[in-house]
Image (cartoon, rainbow, N blue to C red):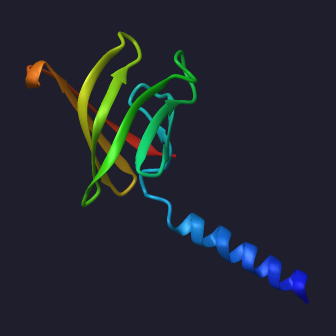
Amino acid sequence: MFRKVSLALAATLIMAGAASADPIEGNWKTQAGDTAAIAGGGAFSITLKSGKYAGKTIGSLEAAGDNKYAGSITDPANDKTYSGKATLSGTSLKMSGCVLGGLICKSQTWHKL
């Protein structure tokens, strides 16, 4: 009896943990075609999982409310770090970032895998 209760409790806890995951968490296809993983809790780290820069952490975002995130992201090709923001809409994540007070900006859209 104790074993059945323990298994049921464990399954419930696992399902509750999965349900509480933020929608930004998971694997994303970048505009360049690489896979990036977003994981975390309070702050979300962005790590490339495939491509030339696989294994490199390229950013950090924090929830800013209403499916919006703010933080920084680094272009792995030139190591320039941009002050950035992201907006989640369904299975699309619009990323944008600027340097030099908004003088130079880049943006791209990622898609959830």
Q: Residue 3's quadrant in the figure?
A: bottom right
- Looking at the image, which is closer to me, 111 or 44? 44
Provide residue 13's location: percent of width, then percent of height: 66, 72
How many numbered marks have been drawn onto this rendered protein structure?
A: 0
Q: Residue 78 versus residue 109: which sits nearer the camera? A: 78
84 to the left or right of 35: left
- Give the x, y percent position of residue 60: 38, 36
Q: Position of residue 42 (x, y in %)?
A: 41, 51
Residue at 45% of width from left, 35% of height from top? 46
Give the residue drawn at x 35%, y 48%: 92
Q: Quadrant of the N terminus?
A: bottom right
Q: Residue at x 42, y 25 (%)?
A: 32
4 is higher (above) or lower (below) than 43: below
Between 71 and 48, the one nearer to me in the picture: 71
Q: Report x, y in % for residue 74.
A: 35, 22
* Farthest-out residue, bottom: 1
**Which residue is drawn at the image coordinates 38% and 39% (left, top)?**
110
